[in-house]
Each structure stands twice: as C-alpha cells, then as structure tokens.
C-alpha cells in the first residue's frame, strides 16, 4: 500500500507520480494543511455536512446519498477563484450509472464556501496538483460534499457506479467524519482490474490522492455498527481537470 505518514509534500508528490495514488494519514494531512493556512474553523466546516440536500438523481437506486456542489478555477501560480454554480457532468465512459447527464446539485452554502478550512484545502490541492502538472495553464475544479447514510434495511454505497475513474486529472478524497459505520474500504485498481491497494479512511483528515487517468478507484458499501442508531460517512471530494484559457472564456 502506498501510504504517507509524515507531513512531507515532496514525498507525497513522488508517491502519486510513481504509483498513481497515495493514502495519507490524518497526522500527515493535518501537518500539510497547517502549512497552507490551517483549519481554525474545522468544527464549523465539518458541521455543514448536517445540511446537505438529498441526491435526487440517485432516487431510483436508493436515498442514501446527500450532497452539495461548488465549482472553482485556478490559473497557474494564482489563487483559486469561485465560479458560478453549474451542472456536474461526467461522460458515460466514466460513469456507467449516471453518465451523459447534466446533474444540477444543490450548491454549497456561502457560509461553507467562505470557511478558512475549505480555502486551505483548495490551496493545498492547487499546490500539490500544480506541482504534479506544472504545464497546465488553468484548472477546472469541482468540490463535492458527500454524506452516505446506512440503515438496517439498506447499506450505503459511496460509489454506486463501482470501480471507476472520474474523468478528471486528479482527485482528493478527504474524510470529514464517520459515525456508527463499518467498512467503506477504498480500493485502487489498474485499468484491467488488478488490485493495487486498499485502505479505509477512519479518522478525520485521512485522505486519498488519485491520478485519475492512471488508476480506477472505488469504495465498498457501508453498514451500521448499531442498527438502532443513525449511521453515515462524510467526505469531501475535490477534482482538478486541466482546461485552457479558451475554455474559460467560452
């Protein structure tokens, strides 16, 4: 398994560059985020997962997913900039369940978007992914807040489309919270299905970084530890896709 235990960004970049992914522990991720501005309002940021909207596009397959969505951009060497609310789109090639569909999710609230914690996470991503691909002039960035709920009657599926790619260049999956759940193991595969690694995000700030064109990723369903109590898995997913200046002005 490709794991980063110490807060060393050059070592993390080498892991992703060499292996196509990295599992980053809570302590390592916290140390790197501290250098990019810190997480002084983390409690407020994490509490915003209690105000996510149901994913109505998934209704035919179950009502276990809640989410909000935001879009940003960043030019090389400049700050990350918010973009107007827009649809999330994945080609059918990448999402066999909901591909080729303009999905308009509820937007991230202004209060959440303005947190210092989110700003720190986006700066970290821009720094890391920009170092991995310095030739990219502009990044199209999408931010997804996910809550996967599980009950005695229904497991929650973090990736109902199965092992997949997102159709971007790089992905950060950051654990916010998990409450009363079992499993939720992340698996990394080669395009032909060979298992490269597996790990479970168990502590807030445990994270996975993925070079999306090179590897597939998925997460096993989550189930309650105690069937009489609420159960959920909260993650933040940030994707970076290379775009050009012409696309930005289109």
Image (tube, grey):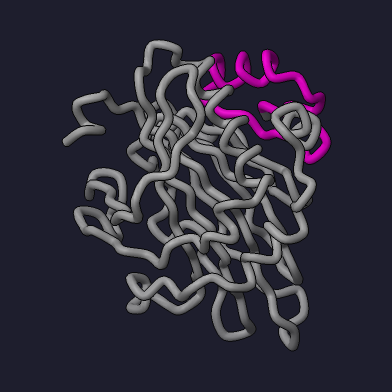
Residue 61 quadrant:
bottom left
Magenta region, residue range: 2-27
Where is residue 27? Give x, y as percent. 83, 36
Please indicate whether residue 244 sits to the left or right of residue 9 in the image: left
Asked if residue 190 can be seen in this view, the reply is no
Locate the C terminus by quadrant: top left
Q: Is residue 56 magenta?
A: no
In front: 5, or 40?
A: 40
**Residue visible at 50% across and 70% down in the picture:** 66
In front: 48, or 215?
A: 48
**Residue visible at 72% across and 61% down in the picture:** 44
Q: Is residue 8 magenta?
A: yes
Please indicate whether residue 104 sits to the left or right of residue 4 in the image: left
Locate the N terminus by quadrant: top right
Where is residue 78? Give x, y as percent. 48, 23
Where is residue 21? Give x, y as percent. 56, 28
In front: 143, or 221?
A: 143
Q: Extreme bottom residue here?
A: 228
Where is residue 147? Give x, y as percent. 57, 66
Compared with residue 202, is residue 1 higher up or lower down, i.e. above or below?
above
What is the tally of numbered marks visible in this picture? 0
**Residue visible at 40% across and 24% down in the picture:** 75
In front: 127, or 90?
A: 127
**Residue visible at 70% across and 80% down in the picture:** 230
Asked if residue 54 can be seen in this view, the reply is yes
């Amino acid at each position: 398994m490709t794991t980063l235990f110490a807060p060393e960004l050059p070592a993390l970049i080498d892991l992703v560059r060499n292996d196509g992914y990295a599992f980053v522990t809570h302590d390592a991720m916290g140390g790197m985020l501290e250098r990019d501005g810190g997480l002084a309002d983390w409690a407020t940021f994490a509490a915003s997962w209690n105000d996510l909207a149901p994913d109505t596009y998934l209704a035919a397959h179950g009502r276990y997913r809640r989410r909000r969505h935001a879009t940003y951009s960043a030019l090389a060497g400049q700050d990350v900039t918010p973009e107007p609310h827009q649809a999330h789109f994945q080609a059918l090639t990448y999402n066999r369940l909901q591909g080729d569909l303009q999905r308009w999710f509820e937007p991230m609230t202004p209060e959440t978007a303005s947190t210092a914690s989110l700003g720190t996470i986006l700066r970290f991503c821009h720094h890391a992914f920009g170092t991995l691909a310095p030739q990219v002039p502009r990044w199209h960035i999408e931010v997804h807040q996910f809550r996967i709920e599980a009950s005695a009657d229904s497991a929650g599926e973090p990736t109902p489309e199965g092992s997949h790619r997102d159709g971007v260049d790089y992905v950060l999956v950051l654990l916010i919270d998990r409450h009363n759940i079992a499993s939720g193991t992340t698996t990394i595969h080669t395009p032909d299905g060979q298992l490269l690694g597996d790990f479970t995000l168990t502590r807030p700030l445990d994270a996975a970084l993925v070079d999306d064109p090179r590897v597939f990723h998925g997460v096993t369903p989550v189930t309650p530890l105690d069937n009489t109590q609420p159960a959920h898995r909260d993650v933040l997913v940030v994707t970076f896709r290379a775009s050009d200046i012409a696309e930005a002005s289109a």
